[in-house]
């Protein structure tokens, strides 16, 4: 089993959405952009992508081209990296202030699979995946974690390319056809489908059932509780 993190295991997608909206509202105001940031922008240009890739995609949608810059750029820098780092500051503050807990259904399913010794991993475009998993009390459940840090180190392309999921499967000594992927992002579902994984489960946290199916999901659920033993109990 390979799980996306934000929006699948934890509701951190809500914090990311808040951080992106706050940051791009600020950036667009600075640049005199008249087309405001919307929730649709998040799902179309940002959801599931590595941070700098998302920034480039979002800026391009408004006709803005900036130099890439360097990862060490300060949040005030007028570069893709600087804007991405500004977003991360918004996210870090929100996570520190609010904390994070797993979705209840996700917690139950992960615990059940862990007890069954099911091989499990997390594939997340976020650079903060280990921090979030630790905060949510899930870090010990996942021996394989492929996040934005690993992707940068290994030169793995961002979702919707299949690279990150394929790398995670290889770390688990499994073929893609042997692996189930849980994803809530359109780009993430497309990534798993491109990697020819055995089952791609779309988790609809706002992207929309039809959009996830069109991206390549085999099935779409509202919550991971659908696969827990309680959900399959005929007496329940």
Image: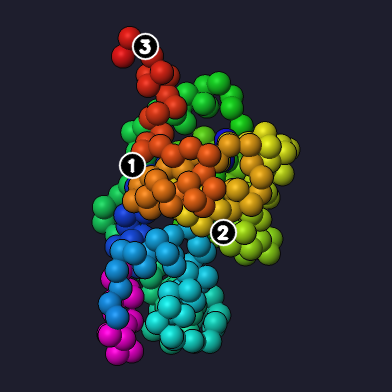
2 vs 3, front mark? 3
Q: Is residue 127 magenta?
A: no
Q: Position of residue 91 (x, y in %)?
A: 35, 63
Q: Earlier in the sequence, mark 1 or mark 3?
A: 1
Q: Earlier in the sequence, mark 1 or mark 2?
A: 1
* Residue 73 numbered tag: none
Q: Position of residue 196 (x, y in %)?
A: 66, 45
Give the crowd class for mark 1: few <14, some 14-19, many >=20 residues within 10 Å: some
From the image, give the main secondary structure of the stretch colored magenta: helix
**Residue named by callout 2:** 159
Name which residue lies at 28% across and 85% down: 34
**Residue named by callout 1:** 101
Q: Is residue 23 magenta?
A: yes
Residue at the top extreme, as displayed:
235
Name which residue lies at 53% across and 87% down: 67
Is disc 1 placed on a helix, strand or loop? loop
* Residue 234 numbered tag: 3
Residue extent of the magenta highlight: 21-34
Residue at the bottom extreme, as displayed:
32
1 vs 2, front mark? 2
Q: Relative to residue 231, is residue 105 depicted above or below?
A: below
Q: CA distance from mark 2 to mark 3?
A: 38 Å
Question: Which quadrant does the N terminus fall into?
Answer: top right
User: Label 2 near label 1: C-beta < 8 Å?
Assistant: no
Q: Earlier in the sequence, mark 2 or mark 3?
A: 2
């Amino acid at each position: 089993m390979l799980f996306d993190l934000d929006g699948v295991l934890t509701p951190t997608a809500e914090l990311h959405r808040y951080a992106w909206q706050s940051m791009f509202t600020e950036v667009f105001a600075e640049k005199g952009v008249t087309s405001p940031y919307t929730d649709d922008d998040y799902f179309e240009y940002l959801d599931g992508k590595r941070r700098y890739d998302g920034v480039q995609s979002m800026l391009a949608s408004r006709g803005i081209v900036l130099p890439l810059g360097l990862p060490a750029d300060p949040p005030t820098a007028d570069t893709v990296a600087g804007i991405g780092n500004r977003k991360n500051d918004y996210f870090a503050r929100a996570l520190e202030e609010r904390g994070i807990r797993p979705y209840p259904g996700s917690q139950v399913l992960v615990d059940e699979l862990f007890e069954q010794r099911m091989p499990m991993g997390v594939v997340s475009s976020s650079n903060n995946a280990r921090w979030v998993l630790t905060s949510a009390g899930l870090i010990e459940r996942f021996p394989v974690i492929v996040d934005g840090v690993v992707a940068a180190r290994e030169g793995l392309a961002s979702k919707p390319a299949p690279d990150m999921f394929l790398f995670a499967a290889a770390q688990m000594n499994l073929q893609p056809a042997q692996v189930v992927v849980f994803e809530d992002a359109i780009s993430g579902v497309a990534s798993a489908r491109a990697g020819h994984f055995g089952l791609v489960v779309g988790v609809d946290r706002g992207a929309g059932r039809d959009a996830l199916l069109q991206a390549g999901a085999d099935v779409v659920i509202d919550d991971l509780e659908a696969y827990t033993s309680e959900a399959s109990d005929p007496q329940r």
